Amino acid sequence: MDFEQAEDEQQQAVRREAILPVDRDRAWAALCDADGLASWLADEVDLDVREGAEGTVRWRSGEERAVVVEEVMERRLIALRWHEAGGEESLVELTLDDVAEGTRLVVVELPLVALRAVAGTFVQSASNGQVPTHPQMLAMVG
Amino acid sequence: MSDAATGEVQAPVGAVFAALADPTRRHVVRMLAQRPTVTASALAEELPISRQAVAKHLSALADAGLVAAAHEGRETRYRLTPKPLTEAMQWLALAGARWDESLARLTQSLGNE
């Protein structure tokens, strides 16, 4: 069946990108603290954007997620884990890079258990035995 | 395996993605989608891997609720149980829609500065 063949690049994660009409510093300002994030990510953000920090994000709909900051690379990347109460935990990675029109923001989200499955394959095949960083892992499933 | 035989495995969305993280298993799912039931031996004939390897992949897919096994005489026949796939697609659709909204808010707020 044709549509099944077309699914060869099976989607394993949510991946979105947006071109932000601002420079990298301004784009980073929208990611690097609770006020910045509250302007777009959710309606309420109670989170210190530093590695290991725990907090919450809330939406007007009443939805709330517990968040843990996994990794912060200044002006480049934020990786976090989040989950609803009783829900499945997923990993979210926000990455910035420069493009002609401004700054590109790439968002990848996938359930953590799926990432572990992919990482397991990767680690087995890696000769140095080091656990790869999130961007490398996510590149495999993106 | 008894759960898999009834096709009533309740696997969370993440387990479905984990099962589908393997390209061979994705291929097996596509093959299963093209016929009502199939044996591990028949699948192995069409794949460059052993019957044992196929059986292992089928077992992983069964654990994720994507495949059900039924014993017919000496044969075990497998069929696709696509409900968890639908749930995984729903997760993708909902998470994607949320990001679309968030990114629209972000580009709008930055564009208005």
Image (cartoon, rainbow, N blue to C red):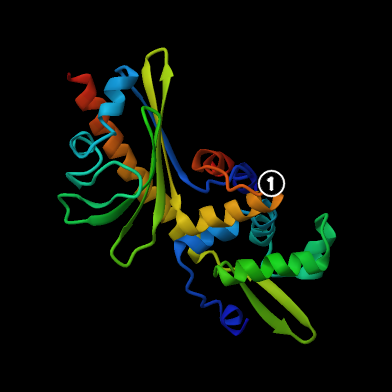
x and y percentages locating residue A51 in the rendered image: 35, 45
- The residue carrying mark 1 is A126
Report the quarter where the C terminus of chain B lies: top left
In the depicted view, which residue is nearer to us: B79 or A132? Answer: A132
Q: Secondary structure at mark 1?
A: loop
Please tell me whether residue A10 is drawn above or below residue B58 in the rendered image.
above
Tag 1: amino acid: Ala
Residue displayed at 69% across by 58% down: B28
x and y percentages locating residue A20 in the rendered image: 32, 22
Please tell me whether residue B7 is drawn above or below residue B15 in the rendered image.
below
Relative to B31, A29 lies left or right: left
Relative to A111, B81 lies left or right: right
Question: Toward which corner of the image does residue B50 lie, by quadrant?
Answer: bottom right
Question: Toward which corner of the image does residue A95 lie, by quadrant?
Answer: top left
Please tell me whether residue B84 is drawn above or below residue A139 in the rendered image.
below
Relative to B3, A13 lies left or right: left
Residue displayed at 54% across by 64% down: B82
In the depicted view, which residue is nearer to us: B47 or A37? Answer: A37
x and y percentages locating residue A96 in the rendered image: 40, 28
Q: How many marks?
A: 1
Residue displayed at 81% across by 67% down: B51
Callout 1: 10 Å neighbours few (<14), some, many (20+)? few
Relative to A8, A45 lies left or right: left
Q: Chain of mark 1?
A: A
